[in-house]
Image (cartoon, grey):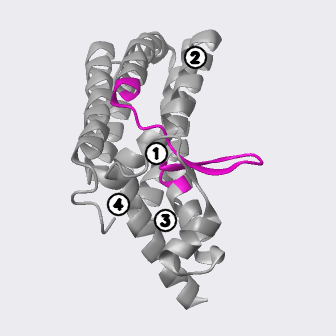
Amino acid sequence: METFKTRAQHVADDLRRRILGGEFKGGTQLRQDALAKDYAVSRIPVREALFTLESEGLVEFHAHRGAFTTELSVDKIRELFDLRVLLEKYILKAAIPNLTSQDLEGAENILLKYDSALDSGRNIDNWSEYNFAFHKALYAPAGFPETLALITQINTKSDRYIRMQLLYTQEIEKAEKEHHELLELARRGEVENACELLEKHILDACEGIVSVLEEGSHGIANV
């Protein structure tokens, strides 16, 4: 079993390098049989490698069609994150005056679970889920269901990019610190400061992802 794991990691590392380096463009189908032949392994480690890259946001599985590389468009990333700034500042501004002690406790509990998952380096699939759950806990008291639905939709589209940011930019500690600062500002009712921090938090994440894509595979082979 350990042999398969080692081979799967080798395949995942090399495919990651090739995808981020631009060898496989967005939307390219990754055929398991061809990759198995390419790497001189069976399909089992190839499949495990593809699942690893899916958790990192670099590969998507389409029903009945197989695995494809994710569309990694800098313009799309910037548009999505600019939309996040507009909508999330709007809803946070309305939410903070309505936050109860129970709301704040719920957000803090999510944040502690999120911190634990990040610090352990495990449960990569859950990282972006915890991230959005924390933000959503702060936004929900605004009572703007349509805005929250739009934010949820945008975050779903941003999910793979958020995972890439957490995995590749080496700024997990910064993200954790900003979340705790945002919670504290919300607790103190400092609406403007909270909104300013939120904007910086989102845009810094965006630029971190863009840097990863522009640098290709440089510096991330051991991620």
Q: CA distance from mark 2 to mark 1?
A: 22 Å
Instruction: Residue type at mark 4: give it.
Output: Arg
Q: Which residue is mark 3?
A: 122
Cα gap from disc 3 to disc 1, whole angstroms: 16 Å
Q: Nearer the viewer, mark 4 or mark 3?
A: 4
Expressed as whole percent of the image width and height from the top left, the position of residue 85 reads 37, 18
Residue appearing at x 57%, y 84% in the figure? 4
Using the rendered view, name the quadrant where residue 202 is placed: top left
Q: Which residue is mark 2?
A: 150
> Please, is residue 213 above or below residue 140 in the view?
below
Q: Earlier in the sequence, mark 4 or mark 2?
A: 4
Q: Secondary structure at mark 3?
A: loop
Q: Return the residue at label 4.
A: 17
Residues under numbered marks 4 and 2 in contact, where contact means CB atoms less than 8 Å apart: no
What kind of element bears circle 1? helix
Residue type highlighted by circle 2: Leu
Going by the numbered disc 3, the residue's amino acid type is Arg
Q: Between label 1 and label 4, give the one nearer the viewer.
A: 4
Within 10 Å of disc 3 (Cα), the crowding (few <14, some 14-19, many 20+) is few
Q: Nearer the viewer, mark 4 or mark 2?
A: 4
For label 2, the SS is helix
Tell me the distance, in whole angstroms, between the alpha carbons under discs 4 and 2. Answer: 34 Å
Residue 111's disc number: 1
Residue in view at x 47 percent, y 72 percent: 11
What span is colored magenta in the figure? Answer: 54-77
Q: Is residue 188 left or right of residue 98?
A: left
> Where is residue 16 shown, x and y percent of the image?
40, 59
Which residue is depicted at the point 41% across and 38% down? Answer: 72
Q: Which of labels 2 and 1 is toward the front? A: 2
- Cα–Cα span, label 1 and label 4: 32 Å
Q: Position of residue 170 (x, y in %)?
A: 26, 54
Position of 144 with respect to 210 (left or right) is: right
